[in-house]
Image (spheres, rainbow, N blue to C red):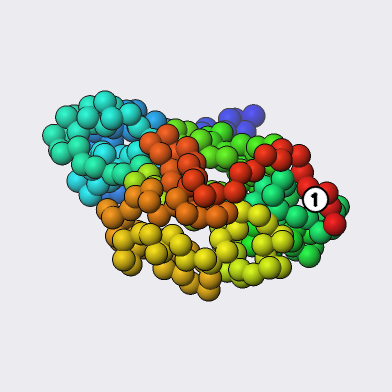
Amino acid sequence: MEAALSSAAIAVMFMLILGLLLAGILAIASQRLFVYEDPRIDAVEDMLPHANCGACGTAGCRAFAEQLVAGELQPGKCTVNSVDMNRQIASFLGVDLGQQEKRVARLACAGGSNVAHTHASYAGLDTCRAAALVSGGGKGCVWGCLGFGDCGEVCDFDAITMDRQRLPVVDAVRCTACGDCVDICPRDLFSLQPVSHRLWVACSNPEAGDAAEADCRVLCNGCGRCAADAPEGLITLHDKLAVVDYSRNALASRLAIERCPTGAIVWLDDADTVLKGKAAIRIVRKEALPVG
């Protein structure tokens, strides 16, 4: 009995000594390995929108807060946050607000189901990525939007909805320029554009001609009228497709869209509303074109 008690006591003492030893090691390690973190990071993060959209160029709001405190970025680079809140961050850190022009996602296609032909019915997974692997989803224009809404599904900010003609519509107010729609589109139709880029070519088909025009009524037909009417060098034709040189964006005006016969080149106003030129074909059909 005494031997058993003695063994138990030894075991308890051993565990006590081991616990004290490990605690001492942890205490020393915590002092040696301690990494100081500026408490202002937490305060700044609380003033950010917690969208973690990546539009500022960082991995999320925490990373953005760390770079703000380090002086590597300016508060104005966050275009999701309100201007007043960004001013509060600038005042808190004692730095300049800085400026960052808001960017939005834009689609280089206007070929909805009412103007663009589908030659075969697609039956399979209701995703653009799946349809793109099966003869292009049956759409006549192999560069056009497939209309299954993958972009809207991945948008965490409800900034993309599908209209009646199965085309994505971007809400410029809600869009954070996170780039998820850019990454998921199998036809690379989305790009992130500064809102000052008012002149926009809503087409990506480089093959103008009778066959291409038969497939879509609103494609860029390479007529060159926009290039002729715009200031020299602002618009050029690449493979029969109009391309805007945004390095000359200050020269852009609505004059370039007025004689476009298909309405493929458009002007976007302050609300990102699409405006077409006077010569653009008037689309009155709302229903989808028949398959075939």
The answer to whether residue 109 is seen in the rendering is no
Residue at point 61%, 44% (across, down)? 282
Residue at point 25%, 47% (across, down)? 73
Residue at point 13%, 34% (across, down)? 94
Q: Nearer the viewer, residue 27 or 265?
A: 265
Residue farthest to the bottom, as pictured: 239
Residue 24 is situated, as x and y percent measured from the top left of the image, at: 34, 41
Residue farthest to the left, as pictured: 94
| Disc 1 packing (10 Å; few <14; some 14–19; many ≥20) | few
Give the left or right position of residue 174, taking residue 291 as reference.
Answer: left
Q: Nearer the viewer, residue 237 or 166?
A: 237
Residue type at the position of mark 1: Leu
Q: Which residue is mark 1?
A: 125
SS at mark 1?
loop
Q: Nearer the viewer, residue 287 or 165?
A: 287
Res. 17 image quadrant: top left
- Where the C terminus falls, by quadrant? bottom right
